[in-house]
Amino acid sequence: MKLNKLWSAVVALLLAFPAMAQQTKQYSLDELMWGGSSYWQLQPKNLYTSFWGDRLLEADVEQIRTLADEKGKKVKKPEVLFTLDEVNAAIDTAKWGKVYSLMSHRFLSGKETSCLLSTSKVRFLYDWKAKQVVWQQPLAQQTQASKFEPQSRQTAYVKDWNLYVTRADGQTQQVTTDGSRELQYGMSVHRDEFGIYEGLFWSPKGSLLAFYRMDQTMVTDFPLVDIAHRVAQLAPEKYPMAGMTSHKVTVGIYNPATQQTVYLQAGDPTDRYFTNIAWSPDERTVYMIELPRTQDKAELVAYDAATGQRKAVLYTETNSRYVEPMNPITFLPWDDTKFIYQSRRDGYNHLYLFDTTGRELRQLTKGEFEVLDFVGFNTKTKSVIIRSNEASPIRYNHYSVSVENGKRTLLDNGRGVHRAQLSESGAFLLDRWSAPDTYRSVDLVATAKPMQLQLHTAQSPYAANGLPPVESGTIKAADGQTNLYYRLVKPVGFDPQKKYPAVVYVYGGPHAHNVDESWNYLARPWEVYMAQRGYLLFVLDNRGSENRGFEFESVTHRHLGDNEMADQLEGVKFLKSLPYVDGDRLGVHGWSFGGFMTTNLMCSYPDVFKVGVAGGPVIDWKYYEVMYGERYMDTPEENPEGYASSSLLPKAKNLKGRLQIIVGYNDPTCVLQHSLSFLRACEDAGTQPDYFVYPGEGHNMMGQDMVHLHERITRYFDDYLR
Amino acid sequence: MKLNKLWSAVVALLLAFPAMAQQTKQYSLDELMWGGSSYWQLQPKNLYTSFWGDRLLEADVEQIRTLADEKGKKVKKPEVLFTLDEVNAAIDTAKWGKVYSLMSHRFLSGKETSCLLSTSKVRFLYDWKAKQVVWQQPLAQQTQASKFEPQSRQTAYVKDWNLYVTRADGQTQQVTTDGSRELQYGMSVHRDEFGIYEGLFWSPKGSLLAFYRMDQTMVTDFPLVDIAHRVAQLAPEKYPMAGMTSHKVTVGIYNPATQQTVYLQAGDPTDRYFTNIAWSPDERTVYMIELPRTQDKAELVAYDAATGQRKAVLYTETNSRYVEPMNPITFLPWDDTKFIYQSRRDGYNHLYLFDTTGRELRQLTKGEFEVLDFVGFNTKTKSVIIRSNEASPIRYNHYSVSVENGKRTLLDNGRGVHRAQLSESGAFLLDRWSAPDTYRSVDLVATAKPMQLQLHTAQSPYAANGLPPVESGTIKAADGQTNLYYRLVKPVGFDPQKKYPAVVYVYGGPHAHNVDESWNYLARPWEVYMAQRGYLLFVLDNRGSENRGFEFESVTHRHLGDNEMADQLEGVKFLKSLPYVDGDRLGVHGWSFGGFMTTNLMCSYPDVFKVGVAGGPVIDWKYYEVMYGERYMDTPEENPEGYASSSLLPKAKNLKGRLQIIVGYNDPTCVLQHSLSFLRACEDAGTQPDYFVYPGEGHNMMGQDMVHLHERITRYFDDYLR
């Protein structure tokens, strides 16, 4: 080798070395996202548990074994309760098929050595001491909804929109016969608003079944089209749009013993919402919370379950903006005359104790924080277990609250974001949590004594130098007072001397937040992906988002988008104040309400944002549905100015930057009329948005499409912002 | 001024001067395209004419005046026949409304001094000598089709899918009552294939009316959605897809005198096509050409018009690929026993003389060229006037053909592309033509003597230095033998030393061509726009396109796309051989069949084309309709390999370059299932096409959307190819 060649080699090596030193692992979206096929291969082993009484068990596909005893003490040597093979040996697999995994199981009582399991054809109780099936019930096929009642061992289910009940002995009763797509029995109603997610409500002992009946013959069909056929087929969706004729809901009570149904005598159901169905412990009374279509009033009403007779209005709450009851009442396990009602009437969601005469006994929780979840009771200490953000708006912990004196005790470690499940007596919480620096931890927490037993912990599966620096902090909202929480995801290999393009990810609507103290401040996989590619990501929970109290959320009432955008612009100000942000290269991306925000920001501030990607956007609230839409916007007739000024159709002409709108072609939530009307408006105005659709997908992309979608979003920023 | 400043100024001037000299007028798409609002302002004045007998008249909005006398001699001083004001003074404008323009008018006979005109409410004959209305007939409103018969002055029309006849005296007869979207009367049938474009056929003197009846109750609806409503509405289109159940057509004969209808006794209409309806001069016989669904046979059949009885099959033609009769028979005006039949049986479309017994008397035209149009007769010389491409495949001229001896005489100047209209006796042609160097010319041409009188000529409204150099030539097809015609549009300000990106514009399907000897070789406005922006455009009429004979067109039979792409690849070879073409920057764009070609080329040759824009593409021929689709592909059952290999769904995975698919959201021709299925296939395969839709538009964009569309297409090439 001649010297000059050697010298070149040395130079090449010297040049290559710093690059190698900085080389970071590049993750694909497939590795980063839940929808990706390689995501799960990368994930650290998890711990799957359940309670058998107060005993904690661990489950996997093959076996179920003890983890902690009824005192919360970790067992030294886990004992296998039963295995998959044992279960399959006990059932007639030729007739019923096999159980393929023990992950899905349920212990009905800590007093019995049996476990509820199922194949695709049968539900059964397996007694692992006797190693045999002690009860079984054939499962109806192609059901649309199903609800098992453990005490009476009855199953209510919906098939072809009609209601059926299978009794413990397997005998099946057809409850209704005139069900159809237009007249549904036993299904969730009111488009899943007001905390509704199902339509079957067994009484505590299974003597009676309350169920929803929804007549939507009078509701306009929105013509969705399903292309997955030789010739595309109409797949219409009953979709009552703001201000238009809505469906009519009634509540029936079915008695399997008499095979009779009575309907609650709630009066004319036109333009009313019947929500949060609950039973009295003695099964004699059914409670619901009733709202008029205006949603400015909520009444807790008691009905005689045997006759359907309206007995009393126990409590009434009004609000000139809106009342939004999200939780049914819950009776104290130790006192059948008292129940807990959740209300935001003092500005935050709190618990109130009532008696069955409607007398308000006391407010159980109070303060400038939200009770996020009512988890259950510790019957021994007579306390309520809740989850709240008392410590910080973005920190979610569990507390016990004494029903007697309202004393609150922090149960978990007080860090991060926790979500827990209660044991049978309420003595223990299985507490799954993460924190900005903690990927995942699972603890067993006692609710009546200080005890936090770490059962499992998992490190992030991603190499530290492959992950971006993530920070969180607060800025002031556009009102100059309110603290807003942000997350800042810096590019991987961040260099403060450089200028980076920045993308604002936004949702901005009610019932959601994007910043909290879970792992990496809740940074989304796509943000990591973008940070790998040299983008800075910024996420701000503006006013109008959840968990910050009623005023924070409802300040947007009747003019959705205005305060939300004003706050996001404060975020942009902050971003531009950072020396390493290139203020000329700002992008914005959001989905659903965030798609509305993105399109709105692109068209309202065409000189601020250069590139936007809006997914499943609302374009005009008059195309959105009655329940959600009218809560925040009233009807188009009541609020014509609000509808006009929040519509993005007149703003289509302002579009200057690059905006891609992406939708699921079969979106039943935010129907295609939104995006298509916007395209039409742009075409008429001579502006040029981009567009993409996922045939067969609904409001959100699923599985591999999620990965495809985010490749697409990324490419758009790469094309026009990088 | 100091010297150095002066010097700078001189340098600046010197630098500026060559730039100024080369400065060209930049035209917007709005100025270049028919859909643009400024296009028409730029257009030179045109000449609008009509024949009154053999006299040539000129019409504008305000008046109609003489241009040439019945001898074809230009009048020295044009005489005004009548004015708009005179017409409106003669009608009851209070009752009928006004005539707003004389551009739309019709002279029924050279022997009468009256002209047929109409307002929106009335059709009337205006006698300009008497200055009065001599006959009038109210016009039905909101009709779907309408046909006026001048001798009997009757109007047949369709309203709400039912057939009506208004007699000369204004009396209206309802002919059918069970019409509906599914059962249509008097409308065009068979999706406008086989030369069908209407469904009402008056007999020569108006005694009888033949009409189509189409029963499509058995045809699957394709669910199109119209978003121009408060809630989007279904706007279904009866769309029989290849291989699926098709509609049933019958032909009725209505007699307004007896108000009776008989149906032609053609037998079971299942899977049959009834086309090219014609009348005998004595009104006693109706002729149609009948094809089985296989389209491999055409029969000319005579029916008794009074009874509907099938009289005789006069002529049968078969072809293992397909027979495609496009023209009804035409009787010689001087001999009721003889008619002309057009056929491509010798490989080119030619005229044949038959007598009414079905005896073939002689072939009137012959040669390796196509008779493009049968224009009419010169009754005095007993000759036929045709338009053909005898001189060159891309040159379209008019000829007279002696019925006696077949002698052909060129009538026009033999240059360019002509389209003409015949005077009453056939003595004169009003000949509108253009040539590569001639924007527009209008001549009066005699059909029995050498006479070409130039009436009007118009220069291009575009500055010469704003237009690109356009060339045409031939290359060999992929078969190594066939000449294919191309057009090469070079960038405006072309510099042979530079390397330019090139875009192939392609259609490639039957019934169309893109290169001929009209102005600028038929260069499209968008090509000019692209040439302004520094692109080179290349257009090649591959095998499978029109006007080149049966073998040229039908070589694609059962495997659409293969030969067409092979030929386009020959075009690419040629392009790459040009020193000023940058072979690494090739794009492709096409619409409809051209969208199929574009998508196909992008996915079949991912390393050849970098960027493509495909409009309204066919993606899989099984989603296309029965009439057109099965002609070229047979049914999916008969030709499974052809359907499989021509489908672009399996090719979706190959996509590498940038491909934008654009469709009219309400396209009833190439339904959205094509593009949506392709997106789905790409999503499943992990490839990334782009997509855009025009809500409310059909298969082709109209008006201002055309301009918007081409801005969009241009931007895509600017983004990724420039």
Image (cartoon, coloured by chain):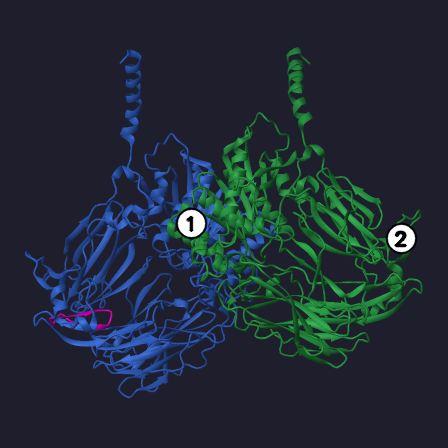
Chain colours: A blue, B green
- Magenta highlight: main SS: loop
Which residue bears the numbered disc 1?
Answer: B652
Mark 1 vs 2, N-terminal side: 2
Quarter occupied by the N terminus of chain A: top left
Give the secondary structure at mark 2: strand
- Identify the magenta region: A108-122
Badge 2 amino acid = Thr
Residue B578 figure quarter: top right
Name the residue at 50% across, 45% down: B565
Q: Position of residue A588 (x, y in %)?
A: 45, 46
Residue A309 location in percent, x, y? 36, 85
* Image quarter in which the C terminus of chain A is found: top left
Q: Is residue A55 visible?
A: yes
Q: Residues within 10 Å of mark 1 (few under 14, many from 20)?
A: many
Q: Is residue A717 above or below residue B425?
A: above
Residue A585 drawn above or below residue B134: above
Residue A114 located within the stretch drawn in magenta: yes
B512 with respect to B167 (left or right): left
Residue A370 drawn above or below residue B36: below
Which secondary structure lies at badge 1?
helix
Query: Residue tagged by mark 2?
Result: B66
Q: Amino acid at mark 1?
A: Ala
Percent from the top left, x then y, of residue A188? 37, 71
Q: Do the CB atoms of the residues marked 1 and 2 lie less than 8 Å apart?
A: no
Q: Is residue B329 magenta?
A: no
Instruction: Say few, some or many: other residues with alpha carbon within 10 Å of mark 2 (under 14 / 14 to 19 / 20 or more).
Output: many
Quadrant of the rendered structure where residue B52 is? Answer: bottom right
- Considering every residue shown, the one lying at the far left of the view is A77
